[in-house]
Amino acid sequence: MHTPDDRLPESRADDWYYDNPVIPGLHPDPSACRVGEDYYLVCSSFEYFPGVPIFHSRDLVHWRQLGNVLDRPSQLPLPPDAAASDGIYAPTIRHHDGRFWLITTNVSHGGNFIVTAERPEGPWSDPVWIDLPGIDPDLAWDEDGNCWCAFAGADGPAFHGVRIARVDPEAGKVLEGPFPAWAGTGLQWPEAPHLYRIGQWWYLVIAEGGTERGHTVAVARARSPRGPWEAAPNNPVLTHRSTNQPIQSTGHADLVTTPDGQWWMILLGTRPRGYSPGFHVLGRETFLTPVRWEDGWPHVGPVNLRERAPGPPRPLEVEPVRDDFDAPVLAPRWISPRSRPEDAWSLTERPGWLTLRATGSTLDRPGCTFVGRRQRHQDSRTAVRLDPGSGRAGLSVRMDEAHHYDLEVADGQVSVIARIGPLRQSTATRPVPPGPLVLTITTRPAAQRPPAEGEPSGLHVAAPDFIAFHVGDDPLPLAELDGRYLSTEVATGFTGRVIGMYVTEGTAWFDWFDHEPLDVPRGS
């Protein structure tokens, strides 16, 4: 990386501004690297298959998904009953010696492993498992070609923090260590380490305080990966804890430089809404913020919803709102819990339609057929054209098996079903004719929705949003439900909403799927 100086980039006549988050929706724990004028970014994927989405950008602002690093079952062995929010944690992507390297943790099977590729879109190799404990591993190389792996985890009762080992990344062997490096500033969960050689120093960037509202970014430096480590005098270098910033939980950061020497930070954050304590529903998202250096230390933040961009805009092709299922393969943005058996779906059985076959009888337990997309907009409209045949199928907003709302068609009627913890209830039903029909789910700000007759006082104020369920072209919803019950604060865990198509009985066909922002009046 470039040696930092103490200057900020000067203002330019062609300045433009970008909106945070730069990758909205369930895209947490971002890691990025630059190769020439191209940037590549990966995120955690937890229990979803395929795993580790990989994005490309030319300006750090406009990102397009190239694919998924773990797109084969041999790369992503997940037990059929893997818990929600388990699976793949915190990948790190780096480019070294002409190859892309990615290291991550499968907390459900096998631990830490490395995959490599000649091109970012793949194919990526099968895993090389490495005998290191802990989570959130990182890779960095010194001038002699030694590879160092920093990771988070306990070393008995005496040390809980970041440890470092010298490794052979080709063979997955530990050559030296691991040895304790830095336990942070004393907050809980020192994790998410990234190690950098910058000038004559090695810098260690970590997260502390947990990935919730107390999240922080802290920095230390040393002359060698073996230490000793000196903490930055301005730690935490970034946090939004105990503030009224609209972006919260800022942390789990990675540094990247532009070709002209600017420094930027990619990190996760959340956008809670509603009454105290606030509810975030999209999961942890990817944000971008500038970095300045003073006296050899990075200074960051606050992270704003709008920032001056790194350089001239270089937009990429925008993904279409609608997927017509005319392609020979599913687009990389489609994900499924734990696996997607080949015999459960087809794009060729009925050309122009996605065919789904039931593999489980309920969304309340693992093993169902579900193909969905991360909800990317706080205020959104998602619609699908469904031919249920004689099956049971629909459109679901999912957090996990115990927290989802379903718009389901079966036996000549459509129903809205709410699963909230131990409770499952059909909240509304309506008869529908046989054949294809359009199902629509919208999410909109609670402030736009007046209280319903007989509704408890304050309900519409407390909710982060309301989720409405429409059938056909009827402007009146079949039902409208409080969105807080599909939030991380209620469901717990590390993920966010995924909206998708499902079948729990027989076979169903889906003609198209739309997901787009809802047109929300300004000031609402």
Image (cartoon, rainbow, N blue to C red):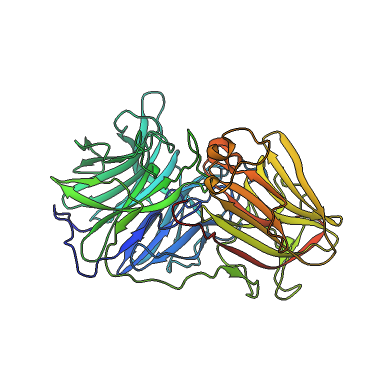
**Residue 247 vs residue 321: left or right?**
left
- Vertical position of residue 39 compared to residue 249: above or below: below
**What is the count of numbered marks?**
0
Residue 420: image location, x then y, percent: 67, 38
- Quadrant in which the N terminus is drawn: bottom left
Asked if residue 361 shows in the view, the reply is no
Q: Position of residue 412 (x, y in %)?
A: 86, 57
Image vertical order of residue 134 relative to residue 389, above or below: above
Residue occupying the point 26% across, 46% down: 300
Residue 336, picture quadrant: bottom right
The picture places residue 460, in percent across and down from the top left corner, at 57, 40
* Quadrant of the rendered image containing residue 109: top right
Horizontal placement of 34 versus 397: left or right? left
Camera-side residue: 329 or 311?
311
- 296 and 480: which is toward the camera: 480
Residue at the far top in the pictured view: 157
Q: Residue at x 30, y 69 (%)?
A: 36
Which residue in the rendered view is the most extreme toward the front?
453
Measured as percent of width and height from the top left, residue 241 is found at: 35, 35
* Residue 151 in view here: yes
Q: Is residue 418 above or below residue 306?
A: above
Q: Nearer the viewer, residue 387 or 367?
A: 387
